[in-house]
Image (cartoon, helix red, strand yellow):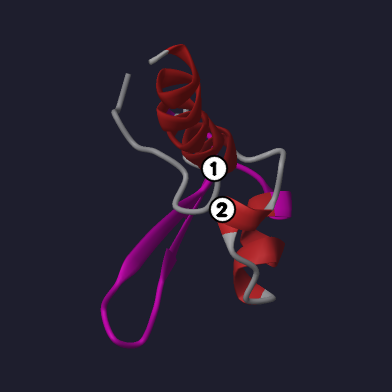
Amino acid sequence: MDGKKCSFCGNPIEPGTGKMFVRSDGSVHFFCSSKCESNMTLGRTARKLKWTKRAKAGKVEKEKPKSAEKSS
């Protein structure tokens, strides 16, 4: 696999798929779907959307310390 991840949701992108977007300042963004591309251009934050991998990863990190405190 190419090792590229979607710049918005964090899902891996298979070779031959996806879209690369280069801004005028030179920053490069990779998107796995038009859904991710449109959400990025609308200015939405991936951490606030439940369906993204980044939101799920942040939620797990937040829950771990709470459960550790309860068991102590």
Residue 16 in view here: no
Please name whichever residue, 22 or 66, is drawn nearer the observer in this view of the structure.
66
Please name whichever residue, 61 or 69, is drawn nearer the observer in this view of the structure.
69
Q: Using the numbered discs, state the Cα–Cα distance from disc 1 to disc 2 in whole angstroms.
A: 21 Å
Say whether disc 1 or disc 2 marks the residue closer to the N-terminus.
1
Q: Quadrant of residue 42?
A: bottom right
Please name whichever residue, 47 or 18, is drawn nearer the observer in this view of the structure.
47
The label shown at residue 47 is: 2
**Is 71 located above or below residue 45 in the figure?**
above
Amino acid type at image mark 1: Gly
The label shown at residue 42 is: none
The residue that label 1 is drawn on is 18
Residue at horizontal 35%, vertical 87%? 24
Mark 2 surroundings within 10 Å by alpha-carbon count, few (fewer than 14), some (14 through 19), many (20 or more): some
Residue 5 belongs to magenta span: no
Q: Quadrant of the N terminus?
A: top left
Report x, y in % for residue 68. 40, 20
Amino acid type at image mark 2: Arg
**Is 39 located above or below residue 67 in the figure?**
below
Residue at horizontal 42%, vertical 25%? 69
**Is 65 located above or below residue 47 in the figure?**
above
Residue at horizontal 69%, vertical 63%? 39
In the image as oriented, which residue stretches furthest toward the front?
A: 72
Residue 20 belongs to magenta span: yes
Residue at horizontal 34%, vertical 37%? 4
* Label 1 SS: loop
In the image as oriented, which residue stretches furthest toward the bottom?
A: 24
Q: Quadrant of the C terminus?
A: top left
Residue 25 in view here: yes
* Numbered range of the magenta stretch: 15-35
